[in-house]
Amino acid sequence: MAYLWIKALHIVFIASWFAGLFYLPRIFVNLAMETEPTASARLLTMARKLYRFMTILMIPALALGLVLWLGYGVGQGPDSGWMHAKLAIVLLLIGYHHMCKSLLTKFERGENTRSHVWYRWFNEMPVLAMFAAVILVVVKPF
């Protein structure tokens, strides 16, 4: 019974973390296009609050995933190549999360050099990562 609760909570926290990973770069798109100082300040406040909240959501998502993997043996065994690929995606997502912080810091300092088009492409990365991770977990292709 505890396994199902942990699994359910893991999915909820992952979905919540991804909501931030999807939305924060969209705020960056708007920041990159914004010329009005008051609007930029409002967007920066939104971005700061969202980054803090999505970091809080990331921690239990990762911790519960570790409990499933190490505590319950999910993705262990001879047919667990899919888990190695999924863990690589998770590491890339953690890096993406921290890259968002770096980009936010550049916006705060007024040092952004990237265009709104670059941020639109950057915004697609977590979508592709989620697609790949879900396929790996559900289909277990290898």
Image (cartoon, grey):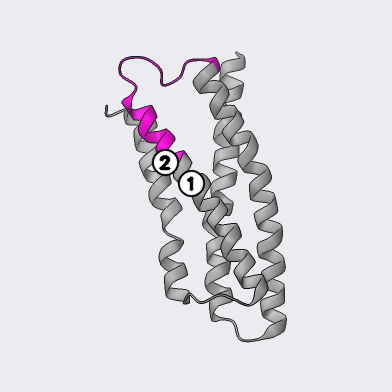
| Quarter residue 124 falls in | bottom left
- Residue 7 seen in this snapshot: no
Judge the density around disc 1: few (<14), some (14-19), many (≥20) Cα neighbours within 10 Å: some
Q: CA distance from mark 2 to mark 1?
A: 6 Å
| Quarter residue 4 falls in | top right
Judge the density around disc 2: few (<14), some (14-19), many (≥20) Cα neighbours within 10 Å: some
* Secondary structure at numbered mark 2: helix
Q: Residue furthest bottom?
A: 35
User: Label 1, on which residue?
Assistant: 93
Q: Is residue 95 above or below residue 107?
A: above
Q: How many numbered circles does the render carry?
A: 2
- The residue sitting at 36% across, 34% down in the picture is 85
Q: Which residues are magenta?
A: 71-90
59, 23: nearer the viewer: 59
- The residue sitting at 69% across, 50% down in the picture is 53
The amino acid at mark 1 is Leu
Q: Tell me: 49 left or right of 70.
A: right
- The residue sitting at 34% across, 22% down in the picture is 80
Residue 1, given in percent of the width and then of the height, sits at 60, 13
Q: Is residue 22 magenta?
A: no
Residue 132, given in percent of the width and then of the height, sits at 36, 42
* Secondary structure at numbered mark 1: helix
Q: What label does residue 89 carry, if any?
A: 2
Q: Please report contact status of discs 2 and 1: CB closer than 8 Å, yes or no.
A: yes
65, 84: nearer the viewer: 84
Residue 23, given in percent of the width and then of the height, sits at 56, 59
Q: Is residue 109 above or below residue 90?
A: below
- Residue 92 seen in this snapshot: yes
